[in-house]
Each structure stands twice: as C-alpha cells, then as structure tokens.
Amino acid sequence: MANYSTNEFKSGLKVLLEGDPCSIVENEFVKPGKGQAFNRVRLKNLKTGRVWERTFKSGESLEGADVMEYEMEYMYSDGEYWHFMKTDDSFEQIAADKNAVSEGIQWLKENSRCTVTLWNDVPILVVAPNFVDLDIVETDPGLKGDTATGGSKPATLSTGAMVKVPLFINIGESIRVDTRTGEYQGRSKSA
Amino acid sequence: MPTWPVLKARGKMLAAIRQFFEARSVTEVSTPTLSRSGTVDVQLASFEVSDKAGKLFLQTSPEYALKRALAFYGEAIFEITPAFRRGDHGRQHNPEFTMLEWYRPGLGLTGLMAEVVDLLNTLPEPPEIWRTRRADLPVYSFRSVFEARFGVNPNEADLSSLWEWVQETGAQVTHLEPYDDDQFRSDCLDFLFLEVLQPSLGDIFFLTEFPQCQAALAEIDPGTGAAQRFELYWQGTELANGYLELRDPAAILSRHTLMAAARVNRGLPSIAFDSAFAEASALMPPCSGVALGIDRLVMVWLEAKALSEVQLFPWPNH
C-alpha cells in the first residue's frame, strides 16, 4: 500500500497505526507562532471502534491500510463463524469470527443487511443496520391500557438481546430497536 | 473561495487600515519579497528560488527589511505585503498570505497594544464578539499563567519536567522529540500553552511576558527575565505578534547563532543570515513593532471558519 503524508490525511482515509487499521476522523494542522508545526489527528481504530487522538509531525507519513467496506446480508452462524453474502449479485460469501461481529452479535437477524469491514480481505468488523425489527421471546405479561405512564420492563429478543420496552408490549410482538443505543423505537411497522 | 460580499468586505477593511495609518502619520512602504538571505528560525521554512548568482528566498515576513528601513529613516512605517511559509497549510494557514506589519519609534508595548485595539475599532462592521469584548480585553502574562498552573517560572523549569507535562496532556504526542536545547524548551512550552493554558483564558485576549527562549527579536526585561512581546489571540487564532524591538547587534547575532545550531541539530538546511539587518539594528530608534495576519483578521471579522473562505484561489488549487 501507498504511504500517506499528514497533508494527505482526510476524513475516511484508511491507514495503519501500531499495526491496526484505522480510519481518519479529523485532521487539523496546528502551528503555534514560530513553534513546531504538527497535525492533531483523530483516528478510529477499525478493530476496536475506539477513537485515538494523536499528534504527528507535519510531513510524517503512515502506511495506507487495505480496508474495504461492503454491504452484506447475514445468513447464519455455525457457532464459530458468522456467514455473510455480498449484495452485489456476486453471491460471494465470507465468514466472520466472534471478534469481528463482537457486540453486533445480539442484533444479527437472518437476511438483515450489515456493513462488513474487510482488512486484507479478512473481516474485522461487522456493524448491524441502525434499526432492526426483532420478536419478543420473553417479558412480563402486558398491562392493558397502560400506554401513557411511561413505565418500562426488560424484554428478551429472538437474538438474545435484552432491551427495555414499555409495559404494554407482549411476547410474540415485533419491535424496532436502534442498534447504536439499544433503545426501543416502537412496534414494527410491518407487524 | 470567498463570495463577492466577503471579497468586498476584505477590500473595505484594507482601505480602513490604510486610512488609519494615514491619519496617524505612519507611512506605507514596500520592501522586497525576494532576498539573498532568509530567516534562520527553526520552525519557518522558506521557499527558495535561484538565479545565476545563487539562491534567493521568498520572505517569511518583512521584518528584516522593515527594520533596515527603520534604521535608515527613523520614521514610523507600515507595510501590507505577501509573505511565504513553506509547508504551512491548514484551516488557519496558507503557504502564501498577507501580512500587515508596522513600527512605532518611541512607543512601548502597552502603547502598541492600545494601537492594535484602536486599529480594529476603525474597521467596518465589527462582529458581535468584538463589540462585546473590545472595551475590556484581558491581558495575561505567560509567565504568571504558567507559574499558576505548573508552579515554576517557564525560564527555569527543567526540560525533563516540561517533557513529562507534555506527555500528561492526554494527547499522544509523537511530533516532538527531546533535544537538549532552547528550541525544545520552546516547543514544549508552546504545546503546554496550547493544550493546558489557553483554553481557560477566554476568547479574545493579549498574552505578554513570554519565556526567554521565545524572545525571538524582542528585548528581555532585566527584572523579570521575560521577553517583552505580546500576542493577540482571537478564539484560538493568533492574530498579531508584537515586540519591544531588540537593538543590540551582539545579542541578535548570539540568538541567531543558537538558532543556526538548532537547525544543524535537526538536520535542517542552513540559510544565509541577514548581517545587514544585524548591523542596522544598532541604528534603530527605540521602538516597538507588530505583525498582524490580514487573512486571519478577515476570517475572524467575518466569522468565517477557514482562510480558504476569505482568500482568493486558496492553496493548493491555484
């Protein structure tokens, strides 16, 4: 891969830092008076999702990372790997391990479209769609008419995820969840 | 690219600046932007060109030339000129920019700071932030602010403590390498000021009493040991930089020798020093002088986010 110098850093550029693939979030050139110039750079570690803040000497360079993002459809899990298929009609399949799916596991529903990040053709991160519709498999019985008090109760979803739902929601109902916050959004529209 | 209203406002500001100096009998002069000698400042990189006689440098500021003119005529002068700094490119930087620089024989630093405020007050259509702050701009001393936070005079703090404090700021600092010289001290102090001290100082303020290693070409107060400089900060942007001017050729030469050594330490190219300037400095009247970035001034005045919004054909897309 090519090397990129600080003046080529821009948001979205994928580079290697300490052996990990990162995506540049922000890059600002800073030069105090006649002081040493530097670039204040925020990078997102694509393996951990953590954001790092670093200063680089202006003109310093980092190796580019061969990182590609694909939209893929989740198919099934064999317990060890989670299998996805590209949505570009190539029917190409890849298997992601537990580290790659990490917290996304609890939102993976068959046929849902996820973003899969590949580094050197190996999946390192799976991000579930922002909103998923999932069935409730366990929760306390619903309370009729209690739609306005704003109380909530825990519920277990078909994927095993636990979310808080309003008191009037029952087992078997399908609800929409924001996977970024894990919050209940409402009853599924299609249900 | 600036919009037409931005370009028009910029033109009006330049006209107001010229009127201001006309009314105060400060004469506009023009100095060469191309010279056989350049700045030896470690952190300034000059663009180089050449002719049959050898290398020439595009000036990083009109400072040396204006001071030679000052030594020759002894009169109050100002210049609005392009200046060039290789490699400086970002939201607040462009390798070519417009600088206003002026010199006032007989005026001290306090008088010059007041004149900077007077100048800004004559500019058309001041932004809200200037209207609310201008009557009572705080003046902070670098020395006091630093002492209050770190418990030591910035001239006396040892390099290992400074380096430790830099490491403790939270940012992972990889742009600085320890050197055993004043340039390294200055780089650490700059970073600590930027990361730790500046954020608590408000949006528009003057900073005075700089550390000795940042004296550049300013006098050093024999009592406090502080460099007699000021800077004007506006929402994190350095707008102006003024000195009580050093007029001692021997002191100027020794400061330049130190900087030339720091350049060698860092493997930077050597640059011919303007000896005519050093000699002339003895003939300068006691005076103060200040440089103000015009593009940055237009940027903050019009509440723009980046220089590229107020400069025609911004770098690198000429």
Image (spheres, rainbow, N blue to C red):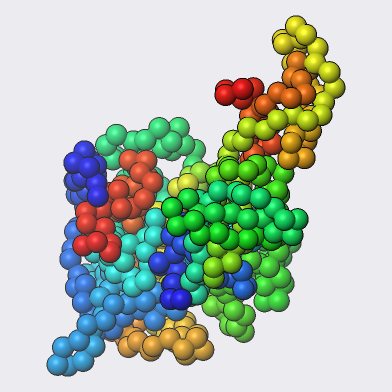
* Relative image position of residue A92 (x, y in whole percent): 51, 59
Residue at 32% x, 88% y is B272
Q: Residue furthest top?
A: A145
Tell me if I can see residue A130 in this picture.
yes
Which of these two is toward me, B222 or A165?
A: A165
Residue at 44% x, 64% y is A9
The reply, left or right, for residue B220 in relation to residue A82 is: left
Which of these two is toward me, B162 or B166?
A: B166
Q: Which of the image's four quarters has the C terminus of chain B?
A: bottom left
Which of these two is toward me, A54 or B270?
A: A54
* Relative image position of residue B45 (x, y in whole percent): 37, 76
Which of these two is toward me, A144 or B317?
A: A144
The reply, left or right, for residue B19 in relation to residue A72 is: left
**Vertical side of A111 occupied by B250: above or below:** below
**Vertical side of A36 occupied by B305: above or below:** above
The reply, left or right, for residue B23 in relation to residue A114 is: left
Q: Residue furthest bottom?
A: B53
Residue at 30% x, 48% y is B309
- Residue A29 sits in quarter: bottom left
